Image: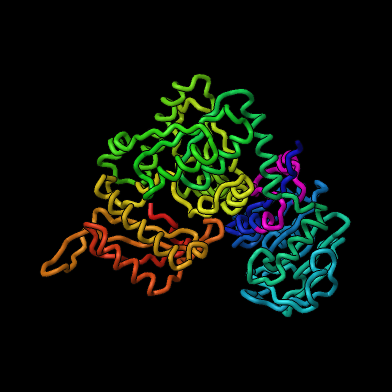
Amino acid sequence: MTEPRPVLVVDLGAQYAQLIARRVRDAHVYSEIVAHDLSAKEIAAKRPAGIILSGGPLSVYEDGSPHVDPELFQLGVPVLGICYGHQLMAKDLGGEVAATGDREYGGTQLHITEPGTLLQDLPTQDTVWMSHGDTVTRAPEGFRVTATTDHIPVAAMEDRERGLFAVQFHPEVSHTPHGEAVMKRFLYDGCGLLPDWTPTNIVDEQVHRIREQVGDARVLCALSGGVDSAVAALLVHRAVGDQLTCVFVDHGLNREGEPDQVEETFARHFHVPLVHVKAQDRFLAKLAGVTDPEAKRKAIGEEFIRVFEEVAHDHAGARFLVQGTLYPDVIESGSKTAANIKSHHNVGGLPDDMDLELVEPLRDLFKDEVRAVGAELGLPEELTQRQPFPGPGLAVRIVGEVTVDNLAKVRGADHIVREEIRRAGLERETWQAFCVLLADVASVGVMGDGRTYETPIVVRAVTSEDAMTADWARLPYEVLDTIASRIVREVPGVNRVAYDITSKPPGTIEWE
């Protein structure tokens, strides 16, 4: 089976690259994000079907601003420059870029002088989203200018013969109404690609990859109860069948009812061999006295693997461990193009001396793609549509020490939040809705005839596409009122509920 040739999104700053990669995937074309400092030779080795130069916050003339190998434009691969990428293409190919003082931010009227390849689906006058200071004042030789604005002479340009295209505006954002059409014209007409990055093809490709990697070896799969590990398990099961044994390490840090659901879905519904390891005491012992969030993640990750290694000794010949690592995990856990925001349980938290080789069939996928693949594999909707849950579980939703009592508080409050979100019909409208326990804080309250000094709970609900960015969910007041009343009434030791209205950035979705 031939692997899909990727459209490479060259990261030139901020979150633009991730959003562009998502829009390419939305058009059913496979994309990957790469660093701007790769040489043209390194880029060519990836066999790209197309290249997109992202936007960025700097000037092409600014010290330290990102640049690309100019030989990239000589590879014979179609290239689309967006905003900063548009200016970089013009500068590197002999055009002129200047700081004219005519900055454009927000909605801007685009005047299409000739539709060319990219703009043929747009009306002659259209609104697009701009965010730039520098301006391309003269296109390089061989380019045709296809659009202008009232302030800039080169808002779009292309050299169809060489497969080079560039736009000053941002087609990847929702504020550009016809941006999707521009992206599709580049992918389908400019690159000659077909929309074949589909759940069916993804399953076929991953099954092929898993068989090539694993051969006839035994495989252990880490089940957590979430959609990621469930989809990864079924992909591997489809690929190698009885060579797979699923292992559910019940670390005692799960949400209410999750251990029973895992057994029901895999052992009884899909008839996949399942080992249920009840290890709460072991994990709590490792977490005793630990309050630093990174230390929690490391401790859980190490103990998690140690349990797996013990199970592996009981399954002679097991050489591989399946994990549900996703593409945003890979990006956020450190690369040339992203800061190391936090280590993830299934990426940064693994010990260096682990005995099992990783199989990560979801490593190239965004969350919505994982859900679609899960549906293709036959997973029930209540599992494919489950909200994301961190690998370290409720341990990183307790700000403070992880104890049996603190787990009971956050688990009970979390159950109430998810139940009320579901009753209100808001489950699909929120990316995540959960609770954080401020275990080291004593909040004063009044219950009955006396004062109380108990623990506060913070409710967190966000909307997002893929967790790279997120906004706080505007939950109806009556839903928040019901949640707060129930938590204080039903969860012992909690006397106050707050609602987190921080977006990402500047915050993260999880507190730890």
Name which residue lies at 79% across and 52% down. Answer: 194
Displayed quadrant of residue 108: bottom right
Single out the residue that lies furthest toward the front.
268
Let me know if residue 41 appears in the view. no
Question: In the image, is residue 27 part of the stretch drawn in magenta?
Answer: yes
Q: Position of residue 15 (x, y in %)?
A: 57, 58
Picture coordinates of residue 457 (x, y %)?
30, 60
120 or 395, which is in the foreground? 395
Q: Position of residue 129 (x, y in %)?
A: 66, 72
Question: The N terminus lies in which quarter of the figure?
Answer: top right
Is 246 rendered above or below residue 259?
Answer: above
Question: In the image shown, does 396 or 145 lie closer to the viewer?
Answer: 396
Above/below status of 92 relative to 265: below
Q: Which residues are magenta?
A: 23-50
Q: Residue at x 77, y 48 (%)?
A: 49
Q: Residue at x 38, y 61 (%)?
A: 417
Visible residue check, residue 368 = yes
